[in-house]
Amino acid sequence: MPLINRITRLFTADAHAVLDRLEEPDALLKQALREMEDELVAGDARIRWLVHESDDAQRQTADVDAELARIAEQLDVCFAAGEEALARVPLKRRLEFERRRRRLQTRVDAAAKALAAERTRLDEQRRAFDALRLRAEPLLDAATQPGAAPNYGIDAPITDADIDVELLQEKQRRSDR
C-alpha cells in the first residue's frame, strides 16, 4: 500500500508541475488586475446610479414640499371663508402628499446609506488594488525583460507602521540637535 500511495503522489505532483508551467503566472496576474479594474469601474457605475437615485428622490421630495405649501394656502383660504366642507378635498390631498413624502424620505435615506456603504467599499477595493498593482509591477516588469532581476519589496506601499517609525526617527533626530 505505501508504494501505491507514493506512486499516486508522484503522478499528482507531476500533473501539478505541468499545470503550473502551462498557467503562466504573469498572465494570470495581469488577468486578475484587469478583473479588479473592471470591478472598480462597476463600483463607480453603482455610485453614479445611487447618486442619480438620491437626486431624483430629493427632487421629488422638493416637488411634494411645494405642493404641500400650495395645499396649506388653499386650506387657509377655505378656513378663512368658513368653508369647512371645501377644506375636505385639500385635507385629503395633504394626507396623500404627506404619505408620499414619508415614502420619498425613506428612499432618500436608503440611497444615502447605500451610497456611503458603496463609497466605503469602493475606497477599500481601490486601496487594495493600488497596493496589489504596486507589488505586481516589479514582477510583471521582470517577466517582460528576460534576465532582469525582480525588484521585490522596494516599491511596496507605505503603511501606517512605516510612517509611525519614520515619525519617531524624525523626532529623535530633532531632539538630538
Image (cartoon, rainbow, N blue to C red):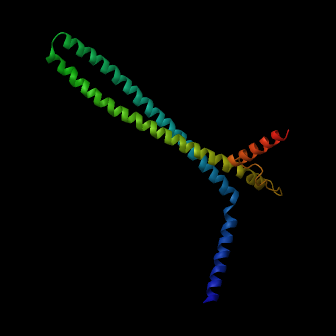
Residue 143, placed above or below residue 126:
below
Residue furthest to the right: 177
- Please indicate whether residue 27 sits to the left or right of residue 151 in the image: left
Residue furthest to the top: 81
Q: Which residue occupies 78% across, 45% down?
A: 169
Q: Which residue occupies 50% across, 39% down?
A: 116
Q: Residue 23: which quarter of the image?
A: bottom right
Residue furthest to the bottom: 1
Q: Residue 81: which quarter of the image?
A: top left
- Please indicate whether residue 106 sits to the left or right of residue 163 in the image: left
Residue 117, placed above or below residue 147:
above
- Please indicate whether residue 54 sits to the left or right of residue 98 in the image: right
Identify the image quadrant of the C terminus: top right
The picture places residue 47, in percent across and down from the top left corner, at: 51, 38
Q: Return the residue nearer the eye: 59 or 154.
A: 154
Residue 117, placed above or below residue 13:
above
Q: Which residue occupies 67% across, 50% down?
A: 132
Q: Return the residue nearer the eye: 151 or 26.
A: 151
Identify the image quadrant of the N terminus: bottom right
Q: Return the residue nearer the eye: 175 or 75.
A: 175
The picture places residue 103, in percent across and down from the top left corner, at: 33, 34
Count numbered badges in the picture.
Answer: 0
Residue furthest to the left: 85
Q: Which residue occupies 54% across, 42% down?
A: 120
The picture places residue 121, in percent across and down from the top left corner, at: 54, 45
- Please indicate whether residue 67 sits to the left or right of residue 138 in the image: left
The picture places residue 124, in percent across and down from the top left corner, at: 58, 45
